[in-house]
Amino acid sequence: MNVTLVLLQPATPETADWPGRLEAALPGLRVVREVEALPEADAVYGVLPAELLATCRQLRWLQAPQAGPAPEFYYPELVTHQVVVTNMRDTYTDHVAAHTLALVLGMARGLPRYVRAQQSATWAPDWDPGSVLVLGESRVLVVGAGAVGAEIGRLLSEFGARVEGVDPRVTEPPPGFARVRPVDELDDALPDADVVVLTVPHTPATEGLIDAARLRQFKPGALFVNVGRGPTVRLDDLDQALQDGRLRGAALDVFETEPLPADHPLWARPEVLITPHVAGAGPHAEERRFAVLLENARRFLAGEPLINQVDKAQRY
């Protein structure tokens, strides 16, 4: 019996051969791109709006094309539907971790200040010992100790930092972590951290996680990094904390509003390093997505549990 998989994502030069490759690897799998095939589809790859979900008569598996789709991906009809949703988590862990390490090292050594000085051809060395954050003498708190957070913590531990995590699911410390604490201990962990790295997805529980009240829990002079999702941090509250001198600085790859408005004061802050949501940039993205799709299609045909399953109500 054939299983029908509908690819809803538009074909690109990198993905044009996916149907043929999938069918060649998995006899019994029929792969099509036509929306008209949705009523007979057993599985779908892509974004499936509510009006198209309503046309599906036997859908059992939906593979999201991203690690963390936008919140509107999980609309009420999809959440209550029987379909199993999987995502693309852990397909660019190495890229995000390397980018995060670059942000932390850049902030620890005051590079944003020197980049601005370079732009004006200003020779302005800062020999104040307090201007440097020594990672080997620092405590790092990784909020979100999943695949990305675990790799970030491992890398930072190689510099001698004491790394702790906070996570709702992970309980055993990943390599390099001293321990992982439950979410209800976040406020207890923040005052001890010299560096706080946020990697969490945007869910109902994490929206606005870092706000004015929580920023007051940070250790004075701490460094804050967000490479997770923008809506987890209230940017105006973060800007105020920086203006008040509460934090050493912040490095941000994701933002509450994207693109970050040109008039937002964070752009001009010398203690802030901004990258435009590119932490996941790097080679092999489509091949890694294909590998997840292929493995899950194999499992689906074999009746085995799928990888990267999502709690639809929690969006991850």
Image (cartoon, rainbow, N blue to C red):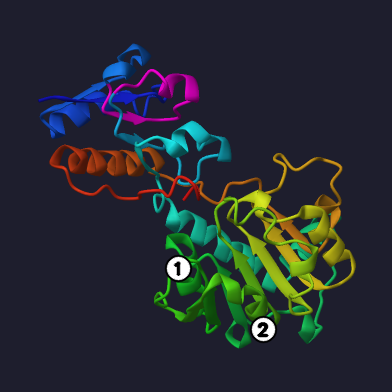
Residue 254, can we see it? Answer: no
At x 32% / y 23%, what residue is drawn? Answer: 16
The front one of 310 and 58 is 58
Give the numbered dot on residue 313. none
Residue 302, can we see it? Answer: yes
Asked where in the image residue 151 lies, by quadrant, the reply is bottom left
- Please tell me whether mark 2 sits on a helix, a strand or a loop: helix
C-alpha separation, residue under disc 2 versus residue under disc 1: 19 Å
| Furthest residue toward right | 244
At x 37% / y 38%, what residue is drawn? Answer: 286
Dot 2 corresponds to which residue? 192
In the rendered structure, the answer to whether residue 292 lies left or right of residue 216 reads left
Report the magenta residues as a range. Answer: 41-57
Where is residue 111 drawn, in percent x and y?
Answer: 72, 65
In the rendered structure, the answer to whether residue 249 lies left or right of residue 225 reads right
- Please tell me whether mark 1 sits on a helix, a strand or a loop: helix
Dot 1 corresponds to which residue? 150
